[in-house]
Amino acid sequence: KDNGVKFISVMEPIPEGVGGILLEAIYEADAEVYSAGLSENVNRGLNSNAEKCLANCKAPFGFSIDQATRHYIIDPVKGPIIQKVFAMAAAGVPSKDVLAYLAGLGYKYSYNWLYVTLKNERYKGIYIWRNHRIPGGMPQLVSEETFNAVAGLRKKRKIQPHADSRKYLLTGKIFCGK
């Protein structure tokens, strides 16, 4: 209405005039109540699924969803790939090389995807849905040690971007002024 759009319903004809304004308001309120109730029911179902560690959304790369139980399972094809990606990252392989490895397998992803994937705790077996965090709620694809090694390297790179294993005379003593 604020933008000059007039609503015309085929299923619920609204007469012109004062009576029509009231009837339209009733229809709108009824639709809003229905929508709010539907949202409440959907969220209740999603939270119930989360308490049982059931799949509420698309499985992350490396997992699939068992159609019978609706639990996450390790994908026999993509699971080993994600394990290799974590192993490469833990060994200090540059992101561009990890992405090149994935591209060679036919999976074209961005640096952002890799960044998000490498910090996704689901790979170490934690089921996460909104405010639900359930350790052991998913199959563990990556060991705690490997996950922590990747996190440690990422933290080191955040403090020292493009850090490599070589030491130079002024390493750690001189920093960029910007």
Image (cartoon, helix red, strand yellow):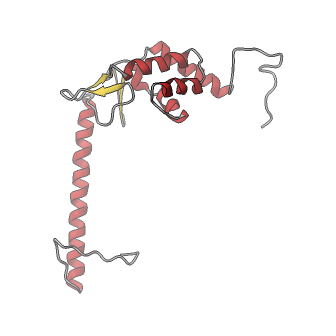
Instruction: Tell whether 106 sits left or right of 73.
Output: right
Is residue 119 shown to the viewer in this render?
no
What residue appears at the point 49 percent right and 20 percent down from the top-left corner?
A: 85
The residue at the far right in this view is: 169
Is residue 48 shown to the viewer in this render?
yes
Quarter of the picture containing the N terminus is: bottom left
The residue at the far bottom in this view is: 17
**In this picture, is 36 found above or below 11?**
above
Q: How many marks?
A: 0
Viewer-proximal residue, 152 or 25?
152
What residue appears at the point 57 percent right and 19 percent down from the top-left corner?
A: 152
Snapshot quadrant of residue 150? top right
Q: Position of residue 157 (x, y in %)?
A: 64, 25
Instruction: Tell whether 154 sits left or right of 12.
Output: right
**In this picture, is 60 found above or below 13?**
above
Instruction: Tell whether 170 sits left or right of 128.
Output: right
What residue appears at the point 24 percent right and 73 percent down from the top-left corner?
A: 25
What residue appears at the point 41 percent right and 20 percent down from the top-left corner?
A: 124
Snapshot quadrant of residue 129? top left
Snapshot quadrant of residue 154? top right
Q: Position of residue 163 (x, y in %)?
A: 69, 22
Q: Position of residue 12 (x, y in %)?
A: 16, 73
Q: Position of residue 178 (x, y in %)?
A: 77, 37
